[in-house]
Image (cartoon, rainbow, N blue to C red):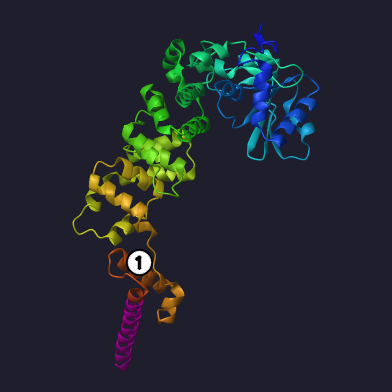
Amino acid sequence: MHRAYTAAMTSTAHAPAALRERMLSQLPAEVRDVLARIAAANAAGHTYAVGGMVRDLLLGRTIVDVDLATEGDAILALRRAVPETKLTAHTRFRTATTRVGDIEIDVVTARSEIYVRPGSLPHVAPSTIDHDLRRRDFSMNAIALRLDDDAILLDPCNGVDDINARLVRVLHPRSFDDDPTRMFRAVRYAERLGFSVESQTESLLTAALPSARTVSPARLRREIELMLLESDAGDVLEAADKRGLLRAIHPRLKWDDEKTSGLAQGGPQRIARLPFGFALLASRVSREEAAAVIDRLRLTRDEAAAVTATATMRDLGRTLRRPDAKPSGIVLLLEKFPAPAIAAYAATADDTIARQLALRYLEEWRHVKPLLRGDALAGMGVPTGPLIKRGLQLIRAARLDGWANDKGDERALALRFAKSIRDSTTANAEIKLHSNGH
């Protein structure tokens, strides 16, 4: 029997009618209209706000996205409600998603779930809202607020009490075995919300660590991506590391204060967050270990390139700090690697001078370009083709090393380059004529 808070609870801050009014007041008018249309189109049963949306509402946090559950087919309800709007449907789970302005609306069919084996996706069947709430991950996400008819707050797993106590609690002892990705979500929610993981849940998490091996690479990668996208991602990953979650993926994965600091600084602008984060996560692993991490997480092309390059860069310190190393030489060396890998190297390399040089490359040197363009070199007599590229490279090197400071310096250098080509061509032609004379 679920716990239901009725509209009669008007004296409390969590009174259902007051909660529903507060929720709707946060949403744009066009979103409120879509919610009303979904509820009207769902003739098979009631429509509820569920999960993180209700949790955040109870916590006084801003609603980012809208999560609904329907007693009745969610895909049909959404199609009937907004037939003119593009939606993404997942027929296996009878869920549908659409976007209204900046807000994503996710609608699920109330269902029950059966896990055939640990780590597998569940078999699902349409069911009641009570069953739907009880199949969820944590008590704080197992709360529903009815949107049609009288406002009712359903709380079958005492989620409101756990929210008030600021606890992350699983709903049953086999929760992490059924879906091991919940271990990662428990840590992520705890750090984001400032909650503690309830003691029994913590023990269950520790015992379930080996079950991480049963999770598919794509689902594991997604959980790490979600951690990296948190506003306090470094703290989330440190908490995951302390619980052994990262080592459960690969024994050499680790996160520490240094990586948290590097991620918080974010690297220079225009460096992609996820490849940078994965490069930090896998920094200090060997090339062979990097390949294993890439395979275990089935990383995207950019993520894999960043992880591989970071492992390759481990031994660059001695080369970077050579006394005769010039900025142009450092640029020539580092531009072979993707920027996220260089940023990870700059955050974690043991050699302080090498770190500073890598950071200077990212922040300054890689952006240095010649003021002259290729057509200007062609106008000075440099033949089109590879020699134009070579001339621009020489000018860029001169700018990096301080030999060319303005367009006039670049022009003088280009003219000398063009003359050297002509002189070389003339010399070769003279040799050829002399040879023919014999």
- What is the residue that sits farthest to the front in this orientation? 11
Q: Is residue 268 above or below residue 259?
A: below
Residue located 65% across and 25% down the image: 22
Q: Is residue 340 above or below residue 142?
A: below
Residue located 77% across and 40% down the image: 84
Dot 1: element: helix
Q: Amino acid at mark 1?
A: Arg
Q: Which residue is mark 1?
A: 396
Question: Percent position (x, y) of residue 89?
Answer: 69, 33
Quarter of image, res 144: top right
Question: Percent position (x, y) of residue 17?
Answer: 69, 18
Query: Which of these two is toward me, 8 or 335?
Result: 8
Residue span colored magenta: 411-438
Q: Residues within 10 Å of mark 1 (few under 14, many from 20)?
A: many
Most common secondary structure along the magenta stretch: helix
Q: Is residue 16 above or below residue 184?
A: above
Question: Percent position (x, y) of residue 3?
Answer: 64, 8
